[in-house]
Image (tube, rainbow, N blue to C red):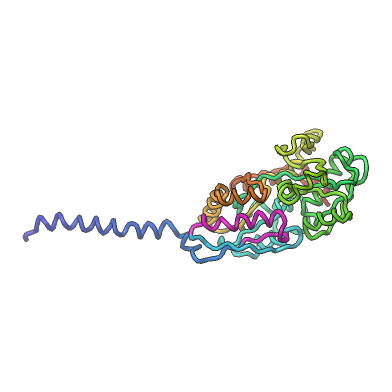
Amino acid sequence: MRVSIRSIAVAPMFALLSLVAAAPLSTAAAADPVAEFYKGKTVDMYVGFTVGGGYDLYARLVARHIGRYIPGNPTVVVKNMTGAGSVRLANFLFASAPKDGTVIGAFARGVPFDPLLGNPGPQFEDGSKFSFVGSANAESSVCAAWKGTGFKTFDDMKTREMVTGGINASNESDQHPKVLNAVLGTKIKLVTGYPGGNDITLAMERGEVQARCGWSWSSVKSSHSNWLKDGTLVVLIQNGLEKHEDMPNVPLIMDLAKGEEEQQMLRLVFGPQKMGRPFAAPPGIPADRLAALRKAFDAVMKDPALLAEAEKAQLEITPISGQEMESLVQAAYKTPPEIARRVGAMLK
């Protein structure tokens, strides 16, 4: 049998060209299942609070830009699901929301810690199981009094009763005053049951309450910077693990703790400040989609358009990653049980 030398040379060339031509198709099919999933879809970004509050402002800011960074470029739509200081939303995410990466929630930073502290409301036992996407800033909270109430320093909070507004037992507006009373001896009277933070602020303006505690510093700056400038608000203490650069002369709660036990208790309550504006998906979403959401979040936090918009709105962008959030919550669940029980008792 005669075999052409030309055919021997050409056959491998055709085979090679066929492989090269097929490679982009097979690689694209293998590399972009996340993009194929999200293409043409809508991602619902739920906010556990009313429109116009700090969590809502951050969520809408992120939603306007993050779709460009999620593979497949889905449309991102913000929806508000209020109730129980965002615990209703957390319960929905944990138990009922689709676990496919099409739902993200922005709930109060302390909610994942609620089961650990024995707080009522959560229908989940371990808040570290959420699929944490990222946080837009590392927060500091404050107690701030209304002008004319006579409260000028933190020591004033220890000498006479100060009336503050709260939302519910799972919210910082309730938790921070209770811990301040129990650990540092303040005399805060808590009037709870307001629908949201904006309602507490209005109550303070009307004279129903004298102060607001567990108030995110980023919200104070973005919404009421004029009150800070003209003395309408007096910031008495900052509640967090580290001092904020804006408040070098305002006492930090961690500096007032006496002994290791008090440090542990305060760290458990105020540790969540580090994940100031958390975004999380339900537990158990596909790992590749969670990785894509985390990557998109990290990228959008550096987006020039988002940063320019945030600066204009005076919203701090000091992000932490989803992995960091996950580690932070997991570490909290390793707190000695007796310490957690004592803090839980304070918050009841």
Residue occupying the point 88% across, 50% down? 210
Residue occupying the point 59% across, 52% down? 133
- Is 229 above or below relative to 107? above
- Is 62 above or below relative to 144? below
Query: Is any part of residue 119 visible from this angle?
Result: yes
Classify residue 14 by image quadrant. Answer: bottom left
Q: Is residue 25 left or right of residue 220?
A: left
Q: Is residue 157 left or right of residue 32?
A: right
Q: Position of residue 52 (x, y in %)?
A: 71, 58
Viewer-proximal residue among 18 and 313: 313
Q: Quadrant of the N terminus?
A: bottom left
Q: Position of residue 45 (x, y in %)?
A: 62, 61
Q: Is residue 60 magenta?
A: yes
Residue occupying the point 45% across, 60% down? 33
Classify residue 231 by image quadrant. Answer: top right
User: Which residue, as the protein is rendered here, is positioned at the far right?
Assistant: 160
Number of labelled discs? Answer: 0
Q: Is residue 107 left or right of residue 170?
A: left
Viewer-proximal residue among 84 and 248: 248
Viewer-proximal residue among 325 and 148: 148
Q: Which residues are magenta?
A: 45-71
Query: Is any part of residue 261 visible from this angle?
Result: no
Viewer-proximal residue among 264 and 13: 13
User: Which residue, as the protein is rendered here, is positioned at the far left?
Assistant: 2
Q: Position of residue 143 (x, y in %)?
A: 81, 45
- Is 246 above or below relative to 63? above
Classify residue 32 by image quadrant. Answer: bottom left
Q: Is residue 41 magenta?
A: no
Q: Position of residue 268 (x, y in %)?
A: 74, 43
